Amino acid sequence: MAFPILTPQEAAELVNHDDNVGFSGFTASGSPKVVPNAIAERAEKLHEQGIDYKINIFTGASTNNWADGALARANAINRRTPYQNTPDLRKRINSHDAHYFDLHLSELAQKFRYGFYGDMDVAIFEVADVMDNGEVVLGTGVGNVPTYAKHAKKIILELNSKLPRDMYGLHDIYMPLDPPYRREIPVFKASDRIGAPTVKLDPEKIVGVVHSDSYDGIKGFTELDDTTLQIGANVCGFLIGEMRAGRLPKTFLPIQSGVGNVANAVLFGLGDAPEIPQFEMYTEVMQDAVIELMKLGKCKFGSSCSLTLSDKTEAEVLSNLDFFRDKIVLRPAEISNNPEIIRRLGVIAMNTALEADIFGNINSTHVVGTRMMNGIGGSGDFTRNGYLSIFSCPSITKGGLISNIVPMVSHVDHTEHSVDVLITDQGVADLRGLDPVQRAHKIIENCVHPSYKQLLLDYLKLGKGGQTPHTLEASLGFHTAFKATGDMHNVDWSQYE
C-alpha cells in the first residue's frame, strides 16, 4: 500500500483548531521536526486573520525547538502535557497562554487509554522506516507512540532520512493490558525484550508521509565545573561505601540517571571508579556519557525510552549500529518508567532538585514556588520505587545569593518519605532511619554551604515543638528575603522570635 507523500504545509492543513495531537519522541529524541513548524506557520497566518487556532499537545516528554518552541512562539498551544523544557513554552505556561498539566511520565499513556483526556485526533510520528502494511521502525525516542497510534483517528509520518532503516531491532514495543486484565510485565533484567521491534499502525489511518532530514538537534553538554565534578565524586563515593558495607550487591544494580551535567558527572565518575563493576542502566534517557561508557566496556547494557544524544554522538551511534545493537533497547515510556519493573530490578534512582529543605522534601519544578521550570518528568516514577533514592543539587546558586537548601521548600514534588539520600557539592546526608530533626541536623551539617549553616540552625531554634518543628510564619523566610533583597543571606529571624 503506497501512502501519499505530503509537504509539511499539506500535513499541517490536516490538523485543526482544538485537536488533540500526539507527538512521538521523548525529549528532543524522536520528536517530529518539520510538521510542527508548519503547524506553527499556519497558526500565525490564521491569527493574523483573527481566526482562533490552538492545539492540545500530548508527547512522551519534552520535544525540541522545532515543536514546542515554534508552536509556543506562534501561541498555538492550548493544553500541553506531560513535560517540557523549552524557554518559549515556559513563558507561555507561566503567563497562562498555554495550559500545562504536569504528570509523572509513566502515567500519561495509560490515563489516555482510560479516556481521561478525550480522543486523539491526529498523531505525528518520526520514523526510520515505513512498510507497506503500516508497520514502522521508530527513531531515537519512543515515548507514548503505541498508545497514540492505537487511539489516533489520523496518523502523519515524518520519514527522517538521517535515521537508517537498520535501526530495526533496536526497539522493544510493548503495551500492557488495562485493568482489570493487566498482568505482570515480564521484564526481569534490563536486557529482556518482551515486545515487537516495530509499531503496527492501521494503514487506513495513515493520511500521509512527510520527508525530513535532520538529527535531533541536541547540543553537547557544557564542560563540567568544579561544583558538578564534586557532586559526581560525592555520589560515587557514597555508592562505593554502600558496596563496602554490603548494602549494595557486589554485582551492583541497574542505574537510572536524569538529564544534565550532574548526571554526566556521576556516570563518568562511576566509569572511573575501579571498585564499581560493569553495570547496566534501566533508565528513561541515555546521554553521551552512557555511549562513552559502553565503548569502554563499563556500561554493558542500557534500557531506555530515548537516546538523548548530541548530534555528533547520535551520528556515531547510528553509523555503528552493529556495535550498539546488543547493548541498547528503546521502550515506551510506560515500560521504561514502570514502577513495577523499577522496584523488581532494584534500580538506583539518581535525580536532581531545584531545592531541598532541611527535613528532606524536594522541589523539582517551581522556581520560588510559583514559576514552572520544566516539570516533574520521570523523577517520581524512579524515586518512589527505586532500591535507593538519591537527590543531588549544588549547595548554592547565583554566586551564593541563593541557598538550594532552605527551611521549607516553596513547592513539593517529592516528600521526605521518598528521599533516602541528599547530596550536594558539600557532602552527603544519608537520611535513612532518621526522624525530622535528625534529618535536619544531618542535612545542615553535610550538605549546606558554610555561609548558610548558622542561618538554618537558627531557624531550627525558632521551633516551639512538634515532630517537625517548623515556624510557619518564618518557613519561607529565605524565599521572601530573596524576593525583597536578591540575597537569601538577608533573612531576619528576629522578627519571628
Image: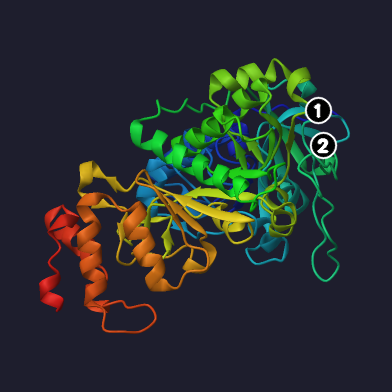
Residues at circles 1 and 2 in contact by the CB criterion of under 8 Å = yes
Mark count: 2
Q: Which corner quadrant holds the C terminus?
A: bottom left
Q: Which mark is residue 15?
A: none
Earlier along the polypeptide chain: callout 1 or callout 2? 1
Could you say where residue 24 lies in the image, as x and y percent from the top left? 65, 41
Q: Residues within 10 Å of mark 2 (few under 14, many from 20)?
A: many
Q: Amino acid at mark 2?
A: Thr
Q: Secondary structure at mark 1?
A: loop
Q: What's the image's color scheme?
A: rainbow
Q: Which corner quadrant holds the N terminus?
A: top right
Nearest to the observer: residue 281 or residue 38? 281
Could you say where residue 8 lies in the image, as x and y percent from the top left? 59, 30
Q: Is residue 91 left or right of residue 20?
A: left
Q: Residues within 10 Å of mark 1 (few under 14, many from 20)?
A: some
Residue at horizontal 19 percent and vertical 64 percent from the top: 480
Residue at label 1?
168
Nearest to the observer: residue 303 or residue 275? 275
Could you say where residue 242 lies in the image, as x and y percent from the top left? 58, 49
Report which quarter residue 371 is drawn in.
bottom left
Q: Is residue 247 left or right of residue 65?
A: right
Against 128, residue 414 (above or below) is below
Q: Is residue 329 left or right of residue 408?
A: right
Nearest to the observer: residue 95 or residue 9? 95
Report which quarter residue 105 is drawn in.
bottom right
Q: Which mark is residue 198?
A: 2
Q: Secondary structure at mark 2?
A: loop
